[in-house]
Image: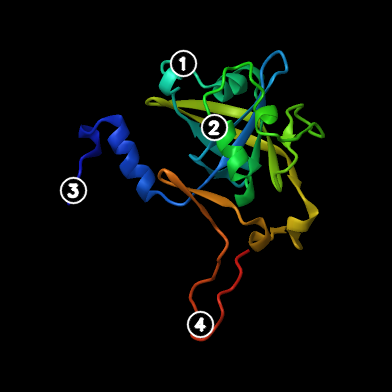
């Protein structure tokens, strides 16, 4: 079976792509506007963009539903301030993350609606999520307009990790982290890891 995604409407093509590109990590992005108001929203078009300098990228789509035709607050805030934080999710923070994904008005503080702690021990002046095990502070490098979406490339300028998730030398304890992944319209806990090639009789190895 072959499908030319270019002939489909955007929604149907999106469903086929996001159902196949799985699991996707979730960037929980905190920003502030020019008046210092806080915003927090999740995006699952997210990955590492560069090793040197260390850079991450997220892709932000257009507003949907009652926000159709508007620019998402996260994109506008990054454009205006060039500073933001990408927080990494544990699975048990999923409900709070979902609350921040709703179409709140620009003046609504998602940290408050989700019952989260905004921590300001940051060099960028943007609050990170205190409950998140890991947070990256970023400065905007560039924004590329790709069709209806915007690819945001940012340089990592600071890295926060809670001590219980840090393993020497410079590794993350993935078993403890139990990150949340995006699967089409659903989610999955990522907590069973192994290395390849598997050795017959071996217990699955914890990834690092």
How many other residues sit within 10 Å of disc 3, few (<14), some (14-19) or many (≥20)?
few
Residue 90 shows in this picture: no
Q: What residue do we see at 70% from left, 34% from top?
A: 115
Mark 2 vs mark 1: in front: 2
Percent of width and height locating residue 42? 56, 36
Extreme-right residue of the structure:
121
Q: Earlier in the sequence, mark 3 or mark 4?
A: 3
Which quadrant of the figure contains the C terminus? bottom right
Q: Earlier in the sequence, mark 2 or mark 1?
A: 1
Question: What residue is shown with label 2?
Answer: 101
Residue 148's x, y, as percent?
Answer: 39, 25
- Name the mark nearer the viewer: 1 or 4: 1
Q: Earlier in the sequence, mark 1 or mark 3?
A: 3
Query: Mark number for residue 70?
Result: 1
Q: Tag 2's secondary structure?
A: loop
Residue at mark 2 to residue at mark 3: CA–CA distance = 33 Å
Residue depicted at 60% across the width and 51% down the height: 91
Q: CA distance from mark 4 to mark 2?
A: 42 Å
Of mark 2 and mark 3, the one earlier in the sequence is 3
Q: Quadrant of residue 123?
A: top right
Q: Is 7 left, or right, of 151 in this rendering?
A: left
Of the two numbered discs 4 and 2 on the same chain, state the one appearing first in sequence: 2
List the residue tagged with mark 3: 2
Mark number for residue 148? none
Label 1, label 4: how far apart the Cα atoms are: 53 Å
């Amino acid at each position: 079976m072959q499908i030319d995604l270019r002939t489909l409407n955007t929604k149907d093509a999106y469903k086929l792509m996001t159902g196949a590109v799985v699991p996707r990590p979730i960037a929980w992005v905190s920003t502030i506007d020019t008046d210092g108001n806080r915003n927090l929203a999740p995006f699952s078009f997210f990955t590492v963009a560069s090793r040197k300098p260390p850079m991450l990228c997220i892709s932000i789509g257009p507003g949907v539903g009652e926000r159709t035709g508007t620019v998402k607050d996260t994109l506008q805030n990054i454009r205006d301030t060039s500073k933001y934080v990408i927080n990494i999710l544990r699975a048990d923070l999923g409900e709070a993350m979902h609350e921040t994904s709703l179409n709140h008005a620009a003046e609504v503080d998602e940290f408050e609606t989700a019952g989260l702690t905004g921590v300001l021990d940051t060099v960028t002046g943007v609050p990170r999520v205190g409950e998140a095990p890991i947070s990256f502070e970023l400065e905007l490098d560039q924004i590329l307009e790709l069709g209806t979406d915007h690819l945001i490339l940012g340089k990592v300028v600071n890295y926060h990790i809670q001590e219980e998730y840090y393993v020497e030398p410079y590794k993350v304890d993935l078993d403890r982290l139990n990150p949340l992944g995006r699967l089409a319209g659903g989610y999955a806990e990522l907590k069973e890891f192994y290395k390849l090639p598997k050795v017959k009789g071996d217990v699955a190895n914890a990834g690092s």
